[in-house]
Image (tube, rainbow, N blue to C red):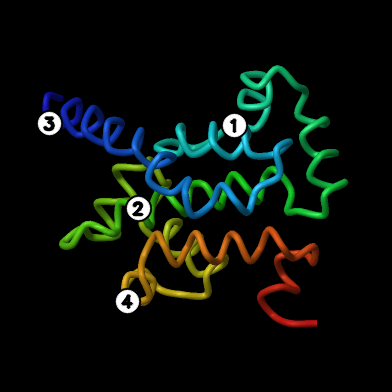
Amino acid sequence: DLTYVVRRVLTAARLRCLADALWPELGPSLDDAVSPFIRLALQHAAAPLDLPRLAAALGIHRKTLWERCRQRGIPSPRELLSWCRLLAAAFVLDDDGRTVDSVAVELDFPSPSALRNLLQRYTQLTPSALRARGGSSYAVRLLSSRLRSSIPLRRAINGP
């Protein structure tokens, strides 16, 4: 139990820096109406994210958040939450010697395969390929690019 508690405390401390570490690259890509949501999601990306709870923490209804995203032509809040989890995983994977299995456990993914699938779905890369391309910095660039695209994720990945 002590090992688990210590790991959780260290993870929480390291991931509290996630938003601050990635914000200089990510912040300029974000609209003022959506940036508080992304920042809050990054601050809580160490565990599965709950859209209604995050929206309530911002003082808005989840449907309002969906509507803001739709009006701006950016991905849905659900997709943005997945991107925040992906950024957290990429941030932890930036540490040399970290395995996908240990990152999946640390970030409460259902399984290492779930983490690999998320990386594959959103980046089209394996964890080692993501590391080779720059890890979290590359993932931020992909998200920034995705924010400029209003086409659905499936078409963005697979082409028209």
Which one is closest to the eye, mark 1 or mark 4?
4
The residue that label 3 is drawn on is 3
Q: Are marks 1 and 4 in contact (CB under 8 Å)?
A: no
Distance CA(mark 3)–CA(mark 2) = 22 Å
User: Position of 38 compared to 139: left or right?
Assistant: right
In the picture shown, does residue 105 fall above or below 8?
below
Which residue is at the front of the view, 144 or 103? Answer: 144
How far is disc 2 from disc 4 in space, using C-alphas?
13 Å
Q: CA distance from mark 1 to mark 4?
A: 31 Å
Q: Is residue 42 above or below residue 115?
A: above
- Quick check: marks 1 and 2 in contact, CB under 8 Å? no
Question: In the image, residue 148 lies at what x, y percent?
Answer: 72, 62
Rendered view: 82 above or below 132? above
Circle 2: element type: helix
Which percent across, then down, holds residue 24? 47, 49
Which numbered disc, 1 or 2, marks the residue that appears first in the sequence? 1
Q: What is the number of the mark on residue 50? A: 1
Name the residue at 68% across, 26% down: 55
Q: Earlier in the sequence, mark 4 or mark 3?
A: 3
The disc labelled 4 sits on which kind of residue?
Ala
Q: Secondary structure at mark 4?
A: helix
Q: What amino acid is at disc 2?
A: Phe
Q: For the point 74% across and 82% down, which residue is it?
A: 159
The crowding category of the residue bearing disc 4, from other C-alpha atoms within 10 Å (few below 14, some 14 to 19, many at least 20), is few
Task: Name the residue tied to disc 4.
Answer: 132
Q: Residue furthest left?
A: 2
Residue drawn 85% across the image and 39% down it: 67
Contact, CB < 8 Å: mark 4 with mark 3?
no
Task: Look at mark 2 in the image and give the residue it sits on.
Answer: 91
Q: Earlier in the sequence, mark 1 or mark 4?
A: 1
Task: Of the two numbered discs 2 and 4 on the same chain, state the one appearing first in sequence.
Answer: 2
